[in-house]
Image (spheres, grey):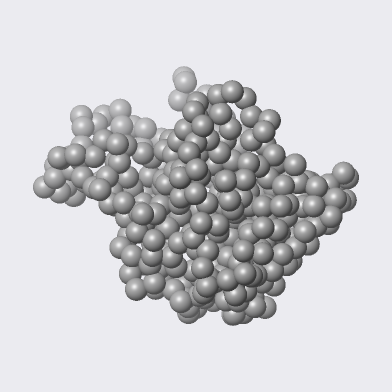
Amino acid sequence: MKRFIAVGRLHRAGLAAGTLAALLAAGSACAASQGFSRAVLDSIPTASQAVLGDHYPTVRVPFPGGVVGYPNLTYASIPGYQPLHLDLYVPPGPRVPHPLIVYIHGGGWAFGQPRQSGAFSNWPDVLALIASRGYVVASVAYRLSSEAPFPAAIQDVKASIRWLRANAGEYGIDARRVGVWGGSAGGHLAALDAVTCAVAALSPSTSGGPVAGPGIGEANIAPAGAQGDCVQAFATWYGVFDFSQPVPSERRAAKSGSMVDRFLGCPRTACTQQQRAVASPATYVKAGEPPALLIVGGADTVVGPQQSRDFYHLLRSKGDEAQLVIIPGVNHSFVGKTPAATRAASLQALQRTFEFFEATLGRGSGG
C-alpha cells in the first residue's frame, strides 16, 4: 500500500511514466539484493596504500557572459588542517593565456570567506564580470588566525599563486601576468605578498602541519616554479601596512587582545616590535616593487587612511610606481552615510581597480 501511495505522489509531481517504472524497478532490485555482485566489486579500483586528495568531479558553474566558475578547487593540503580552497572564474572562449587576478578576502584575519567583499551584494557576480573581460580571476581562502597565526595566511596566499601558475595550461592563465588584490586584512596580505617576492621566511612550508610525522606525510603544496609567488601588480582596499603604528580598531580592543595581536600570535601579551615588523609590508619595501594601487575611505575608523598614505609615500620614496585614492566621507568597506554614498564609493573603487589592472597586466581578450 505504501508503494502505491508513493507512486501517486510522484504522479501528482508530474513525473514521467518511464521514470516511475525505473524507480519501481530499482526499488524491487534493492529489496532482492544480497549485496554487490562480483562484477560490480571487480570494477572498483583500489591502490596499494591510503589514497589522499579530493576525487569529487570538478564542478562547473555558468555565469553571465560565458564565464565558467570552478568552486572549491583545492590548492594545498596541510596535515592538521582542512584542505585549502579557491574559487576560479575563467573567461569564455579558447584557453589561450589570460592575465590572472588573485583576490584575497578581508575579515581581520579572523573571519570572512572568498565570496564576500564590503557592501557588494553578490561578490561572485562581480568577479565573474571581471573574468568576462578576458581575465582569469581567483578568490582565495586562507587559514584564519584561530586556526594558525602568522605567517600561515601569507604562506597560503603564496601557495595559491604557485598552484595557479602550476595549472596555468589547464585554466588558460598567463603565468607572466599576475596581479594580487585584497580588502582590509586581504589588502595587507596582497601587499605583503607583492613586496616579499622570494623571501624564504614567508615561503610556503612543505614540512607539514601540527600533526605531520612518520606515516602522515608532508604538506601538498605546488612547487615554486620559474616565477614563484611573485606578482606584477597589486591593489589594496583599506589595507594595513605597518603594524608598528596601531590601527584605530586596536585601541578599542578588549584586554584579551586585538585582531592584530591574535593574527600575530600574541593574544594576551604585547607583541614585540620584531613580531610586528616581520608581518608588516612596510618592512620589505625596496626599489623595483610592482605597481601599486591603494584605495581607502577618508573617514575609515577601523584601519584609518593614514596607513595607506604612509605606505604610498614609502613606495614613492623608493622610486616605485604607486597610486593613492582616498574616497572622502566613507568608512571601512567604503560604507558611507547613505546607501547611495556607499554604492558610489564601492563602484568607484571597483572601476579604478579594474582600470589599474588593465593598465598594468594588459587587456584581456574579452570585450
Q: Residue at x 47, y 21 (%)?
A: 2
Residue at horizontal 77 percent and vertical 52 percent from the top:
297
| 178 lies left or right of 202 | right
- Name the foreground residue: 282 vs 103: 282
Pick the residue in front: 74 or 185.
185
Answer left or right for 193 relative to 324: left
Up/down of 253 relative to 360, above or below: above
Q: In this view, which residue lies farthest toward the left?
A: 48
Residue 126 visible in the displayed image: no
The image shows residue 203 at horizontal and vertical percentages of 36, 56
Measured as percent of width and height from the top left, residue 263 is found at 50, 39
Residue 231, compared with residue 341, is above or below; it is: below
Residue 175, visible in the rendered structure = yes
As drawn, 356 above or below 311: below
Quadrant containing the C terminus is bottom right
- Residue lying at 72% horizontally and 64% vertically, measured from the top left: 324
Give left or right: position of 293 versus 193.
right
Q: Residue at x 51, y 32 (%)?
A: 270
The answer to which quarter of the image holds residue 204 is bottom left
Of residues 115 and 337, the one drawn nearer to the viewer in this rendering:
337
Residue 80 image position (x, y, % from top left): 32, 37
Residue 255 at x, y = what percent? 59, 23
- Along the horizontal axis of the image, is 94 left or right of 56? right
